[in-house]
């Protein structure tokens, strides 16, 4: 299930990038390709701009919701309290995974000074 949500997050993110790049704050972008800058045209710039803006908001909210859902699924209460779900954290709790202790190199090396 988490793989499915991850795939949905990637798809929504790509769609959001495409929709945002189609917009141009100076009146250009995808909207300018539909007949200039007059807002009175049939299916003209104004309606295309409204559609792109509302699509941006919907995709952004969907991306936020999917991200929070994925986070909740990863840290679900089904896991026991000591299990963080991360191998790095578990390794640090066990004491392993860190660098070995430094050896004292000053013993027996007095003639090198």
Image: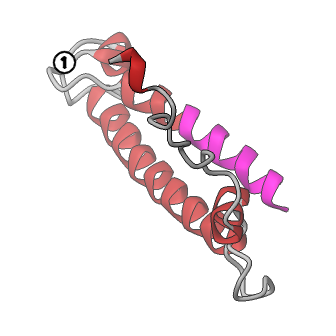
Which residue lies at the image location 34% right of the left edge and 43% below the top edge? 53
The one nearer the camera, 67 or 33, is 67
User: Which stretch did the figure color magenta?
Assistant: 1-14
SS of the residue at dot 1?
Answer: loop
Q: Residue furthest right?
A: 1
The one nearer the camera, 78 or 52, is 78
In what quadrant of the picture does the N terminus appear?
Answer: bottom right
The one nearer the camera, 113 or 71, is 113
- In this view, 91 is above or below 14: below
Q: Is residue 99 magenta?
A: no
- In this view, 3 is above or below 52: below
Q: Residues within 10 Å of mark 1 (few under 14, many from 20)?
A: some
Q: Position of residue 21 (x, y in %)?
A: 38, 23
Q: Position of residue 49 (x, y in %)?
A: 31, 34
85 with respect to 106 (left or right)? right
Which residue lies at the image location 72% right of the left edge and 67% below the top edge? 85
- In this view, 23 is above or below 9: above
- In this view, 15 is above or below 86: above
Secondary structure predominantly adopted by residues drawn in magenta: helix
Q: Position of residue 72 (x, y in %)?
A: 63, 74
The one nearer the camera, 34 or 27, is 27
Q: Which residue is mark 1?
A: 37
In what quadrant of the picture does the C terminus appear?
Answer: top left
Which residue lies at the image location 71% right of the left edge and 61% below the top edge? 91
106 with respect to 50 (left or right)? right
Q: Is residue 4 magenta?
A: yes
């Amino acid at each position: 299930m988490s793989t499915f949500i991850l795939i949905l997050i990637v798809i929504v993110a790509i769609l959001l990038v495409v929709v945002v790049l189609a917009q141009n704050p100076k009146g250009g972008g995808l909207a300018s390709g539909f007949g200039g800058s007059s807002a009175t045209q049939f299916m003209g710039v104004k309606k295309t701009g409204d559609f792109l803006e509302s699509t941006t908001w919907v995709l952004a909210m969907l991306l936020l919701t999917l991200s929070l859902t994925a986070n909740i699924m990863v840290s679900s209460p089904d896991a026991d309290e000591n299990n963080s779900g991360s191998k790095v954290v578990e390794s640090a709790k066990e004491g392993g995974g860190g660098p070995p202790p430094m050896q004292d190199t000053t013993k027996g090396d007095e003639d090198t000074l």
